[in-house]
Amino acid sequence: MHTFTASEAKQNFGELLDSARQHPVRIEKQGRPFVVVISQETFEALEDAYWSLMAKKASKEGFLGVEKSEEFLKRMRERNLKDNEEVKSK
């Protein structure tokens, strides 16, 4: 991974962007890793992979799906309305 100091990144911003289109670029501040600059394509691939993992995890943990979730929320709303009516009538 190519590394720039924060000062180098400022002075060579065009080079940093060109490098980041090819591979991730680490920027260090005060000698420590601070941020990594990546291309839009790499970001989108990472984001897709992240959401795919989250969907698999949700599915493993018993994800209800859209229809069942809507049914559950409808029942909860109806129950809440009923409870509120009972409180008002007391």
Image (spheres, rainbow, N blue to C red):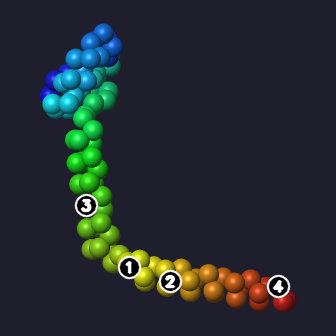
Question: Helix, strand or loop at disc 1?
Answer: loop
Nearer mark to the viewer, of 1 and 4: 1
The one of 16 and 58 positioned closer to us in this rendering: 16
Which residue, as the protein is rendered here, is positioned at the far right? 90
Q: Are marks 1 and 4 in contact (CB under 8 Å)?
A: no
Residue 72 numbered tag: 2
Residue 53 numbered tag: 3
Q: Residues within 10 Å of mark 1 (few under 14, many from 20)?
A: few
**Quadrant (top left, top right, bottom left, bottom right) of the N terminus:** top left
Q: What amino acid does circle 3 point to?
A: Leu
Q: Are marks 2 and 1 in contact (CB under 8 Å)?
A: yes
Nearer mark to the viewer, of 4 and 2: 2
Which residue lies under the disc numbered 1? Answer: 64
Q: Residues within 10 Å of mark 2 (few under 14, many from 20)?
A: few
Q: What amino acid does circle 1 point to?
A: Leu
- Where residue 83 appears, as percent x and y from the top left, is 71, 86
Q: Residues within 10 Å of mark 3 (few under 14, many from 20)?
A: few
Q: Is residue 34 left or right of residue 21?
A: right
**First in sequence: mark 3 vs mark 2:** 3
**First in sequence: mark 1 vs mark 4:** 1
Q: What amino acid does circle 4 point to?
A: Lys
Q: Is residue 26 left or right of residue 82?
A: left
Q: What amino acid does circle 2 point to?
A: Phe
Residue 88 numbered tag: 4
**First in sequence: mark 2 vs mark 1:** 1
